[in-house]
Image: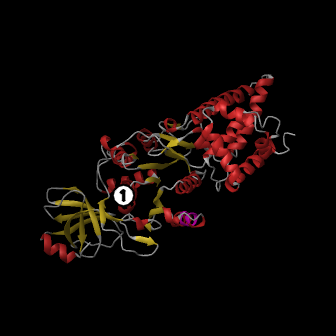
Amino acid sequence: MKSFEYYLETISEIGFVEKLEGSIVTVKGLPNAKPSEVVLFETGEAGQVISLGEDSLEVMLFTYSYLSTGVKVARTDQYLEIALGPNLLGKTINPLGHILTGKLEVFNQDTRPIDTIPAPISDRQSIDKSFFTGVSWVDLVIPLGKGQRQLVIGDRKIGKTQFLFQALQSGARQGMVCIYAVIGKRSVDIKDAQDFLESNNITSQVIVVSSSASDAPGLIYLTPFTAMTIAEYFRDQGRDVLIILDDMIAHAKYYREISLLARRFPGRSSYPGDIFYVQARLLERAGNFKTGSITCLPVAELTMGDLTGYIPTNLMAITDGHILFDHDYYNQGRRPAINPFLSVTRVGRQTQSILMQELNNKLTSFLVQLSKIRQFMHFGAELSEITRNNLILGDKIEKFLEQLTSEIRPININLFLLASFWAGIWKTAPITSIQPSTQKAFMLYEKDTEFTQKIDNLISTSQNLDTLTTAIKTDPELINSLVGEVNA
């Protein structure tokens, strides 16, 4: 962006600051200003026009500044744009595109406006490829597809961020471009994200778009729009993109602050009337397209597990499903604390193979049956032998599904191990042996090429669950490599 004097001389319009209210400035003059146009103050600050009056306009500032009345303002006849290029990878930038970490490099001369209309239906395709998060509960019970918009929702401090980091790491392993938008978080949270990327050697595949809680509301509001614009750039290069928006509740609150300062009529919970439109228009820019895909994981932080809040219900209506992190499950010691009964995926199952669909259906129906049995036990009823066996099997499967936050589980070994429960391999194994034995299988899959090829071939050649369980039962060498002497 050029200097204030340049725009004043070129466009020949001048305005003056008339009133200041937080990050909203009322400017007198500039009769030809347009909505969303960028204006420049003589002190160097920039802002965006958010509303027009008869003889004045309101401007949203991008910085906390010490403007005073009478300061001159010039039009730029430009809209907010960001410079784009492949060397954004590995950088942390702010919503205006200024690099916060990483070497300063010359970017490709490709710029795009940060707020655009979502692509039309003619540019889109059905979601037909799976996206694996590396988390067993999600990949086996609540499957996702590339191009899906899946809300991650739950109270604070119960594992949402750890799950997002696992999804980032898994996406990077799958060769996706990953974008992590940190919306109005503490500086320590931004540092934690950067440390995670460095410690797992995935920095070169991730772009962090960050705004901290100390930034101006206008800058924080722009964060997800900038991140989505970057995602669209890489999508148009033929790449699959994973974008995480953490979190959209904070985004709505900062937009509410801006709207109230601009004296817009408040609606429910004092949010502006267009809050649904603003966030739906943003999230609609994700999807599966002819050139590539944008998989979007917006985050919503709940208060006391309340799913009926205004913004959470809006986001659930906008997205293609949600993953609920349950406070009660967390207190019971379940990790990850995902509630499979209140979580929804609307398009993920259509991307699955027949084998994966059969395993998903069997596991889901079994978990429902297990929940009913446990509720029935509260009445002190006498249980049949079949019911007791199902309870034992359920405990073992839940032990298998428990997962460390540092662990990324490949899908093929996940499918194999889950099928091995239905094949009866673990029938006589004590529950305490489940985690050590399955951990051994995951380590073998990561390190032993022969074992990895055997599992991959077994999964690729199995047409359905019956075929896979039969193959597992008839391979004593494979069983022994997993279970060892546990069943002896």
* Dominant SS type (magenta): helix
Q: Residue furthest right?
A: 488
Left-right relation of 386 to 314: right
Q: Amino acid at mark 1?
A: Tyr
Which residue is found at the position 63% from the left and 29% from the top?
Answer: 365
Q: Quadrant of residue 488?
A: top right
Q: Quadrant of residue 209?
A: bottom left
> Where residue 449 sits in the image (x, y, percent)?
68, 54
> Where residue 92 sits in the image (x, y, percent)?
45, 67
> Where residue 200 sits in the image (x, y, percent)?
59, 63
Asked whether residue 274 appears in the rendered view, the answer is yes
Q: Which residues are magenta?
A: 193-197
Q: Is residue 139 magenta?
A: no
Which residue is found at the position 56% from the left and 33% from the top?
Answer: 354
Q: Residue 422, relative to residue 336: is it above or below?
A: above
What residue is disc 1 on? Answer: 233
Q: Residue 369, relative to residue 444: is it above or below?
A: above
Quadrant where the N terminus is found in the figure: bottom left
> Where residue 143 sits in the image (x, y, percent)?
54, 40
Query: Element at badge 1?
Result: helix
Q: Is residue 195 magenta?
A: yes
The residue carrying pointer 1 sits among few (fewer than 14), some (14 to 19) or many (20 or more) residues within 10 Å by Cα, namely some
Which residue is found at the position 57% from the left and 51% from the top?
Answer: 160
